[in-house]
Amino acid sequence: MKRSERIGAAAGGIIGLGIAIGMDLLLGEGIGVGWRKAVAQDVDRLLKIPVTPDSMLAWTGAACAILILGAVGAAAGYVFVRIVRRFFRMLLSEE
């Protein structure tokens, strides 16, 4: 992996994490509260297990959701840099 691709993946991951945490702050009462509440409701609906937003399962699910969004952002940043590099390589080729 080239240096520019690493930078693109890192920037995409940071942006993805920023968006996930920003959504949490705007839609919840604090960091992790909105995601925890959503995870608790989903587990309650899907598995019919009563889960409170302060339980360990809700914390783990919220952390996984935020990390998945960060990973998707990193992948998008990597793909974006690859496309830009290919575009400039085609633009600057001497054929």
Image (tube, helix red, strand yellow):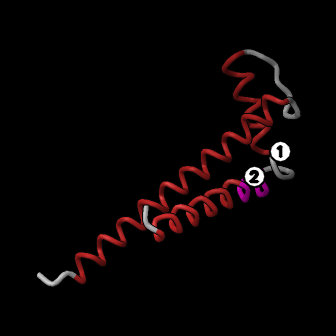
Question: Closer to the camera, 48 or 72?
Answer: 72
Residue 10 picture location, percent across and down:
58, 63
Residue 46 picture location, percent across and down:
66, 20
- Report the quarter where the C terminus lies: bottom left
Q: Which residues are magenta?
A: 21-27
SS at badge 1: helix
User: Which residue occupies 52% across, 61% down?
Assistant: 9
User: Which residue occupies 43% across, 66% down?
Assistant: 2
Q: Which residue is mark 1?
A: 33
User: Which residue occupies 75% across, 29% down?
Assistant: 41
Residue 12 got which mark? none
Category of crowding for the residue at label 1, using alpha-carbon neighbours closer than 10 angstroms: few (below 14), some (14–19), many (at least 20) = some
Task: Mark 1 and mark 2 in contact? Answer it, CB < 8 Å.
Answer: yes
Q: Which residue is mark 2?
A: 24
Residue 60 picture location, percent across and down:
76, 35
Question: Closer to the camera, 9 or 37?
Answer: 9
**Badge 1 or badge 2: first in the primary sequence:** 2
Q: Is residue 17 above or below residue 92?
A: above
Determine the CA span between mark 1 and mark 2.
7 Å
- Report the quarter where the N terminus lies: bottom left
Mostly what secondary structure, the magenta segment? Answer: helix
Specify whether 53 is left or right of 12: right
Looking at the picture, which amino acid does disc 1 mark?
A: Val
Looking at the picture, which amino acid does disc 2 mark?
A: Asp
Specify whether 12 is left or right of 64: left
Say whether residue 22 is magenta. Answer: yes
Specify whether 72 is left or right of 20: left
Residue 85 picture location, percent across and down:
35, 72
Question: Closer to the camera, 42 or 60?
Answer: 60
Number of on-image labels: 2
Category of crowding for the residue at label 2, using alpha-carbon neighbours closer than 10 angstroms: few (below 14), some (14–19), many (at least 20) = many
User: Which residue occupies 46% across, 65% down?
Assistant: 5
